[in-house]
Amino acid sequence: MSKVTYIAIYHPKELSNVLDLLRIAKRTSSKLLIVPRTLEVSCSTINDEACIDVTLEELQRLLAKCTNIVLETNGLEILPIDLCNANCIAIVLGAEDYGIPGYVLERIPNRYLYRIPMGIPSASYNVVSSLVMLLTDLHFLCSSTLSQASNDSPYLRGTL
């Protein structure tokens, strides 16, 4: 399965969400990138090497070599299968109260817009819960891809 290299959030509002995102980033051996809105909700207040404050320009440069999944309320509900072969995956989250502005979204290269399937189209989930749902979807997508590849293997079918 592909490794999630970065979890990025644009202008987080709640420090508690940032701390939860950091826990998930560390658990997945990822780096948490924050484009801070204020110093109070930034990596500088946390003091952890897995958390890095970046400018929008630095974020754009770091994400240039990655396949980027952007959680958006108007995205698609299906992750493309080729994500499982990516060398670098970044997950980009928006501010809890206003998401990711269009001008910021346009600056994120190699992006897939992804929407957590919901019964009400305009509804939204907590940013941390959304990340966990996306990571779960990504895990199942890539696990089933590996499983299918294994089932197609002549070694398992005994045709050698």
Image (cartoon, rainbow, N blue to C red):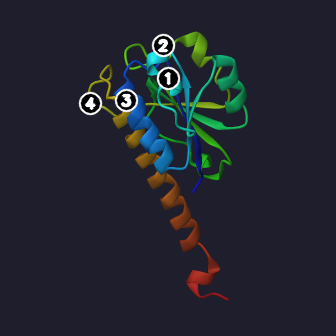
State the residue position of label 2: 38
Callout in the foreground (2, 3): 2
Q: Considering only order in the chain, which callout, 2 or 4, is on the residue closer to the N terminus?
A: 2
Q: Quadrant of residue 23?
A: top left
Q: CA distance from mark 2 to mark 3?
A: 14 Å
Kind of residue indicated by mark 2 = Thr
Kind of residue indicated by mark 1 = Ser
x and y percentages locating residue 138 in the rendered image: 48, 48
Callout in the foreground (4, 2): 2
Q: Residue at x 56, y 40 (%)?
A: 50
Q: Secondary structure at mark 1?
A: loop
x and y percentages locating residue 41 in the rendered image: 44, 20
Q: For residue 89, which numbered disc appears in the image?
A: none
State the residue position of label 4: 119
Callout in the foreground (4, 1): 1
Q: CA distance from mark 1 to mark 2?
A: 7 Å
Q: Secondary structure at mark 3?
A: helix
Q: CA distance from mark 4 to mark 3?
A: 24 Å
Kind of residue indicated by mark 3 = Asn
Q: Quadrant of residue 58?
A: top right
Q: Residue at x 68, y 27 (%)?
A: 109
Q: Secondary structure at mark 2?
A: loop
x and y percentages locating residue 124 in the rendered image: 32, 24
State the residue position of label 3: 17
Q: Are marks 1 and 2 in contact (CB under 8 Å)?
A: yes
Please determine whether, in this image, residue 85 is positioned above or below residue 98.
Answer: below
Q: CA distance from mark 4 to mark 1?
A: 33 Å
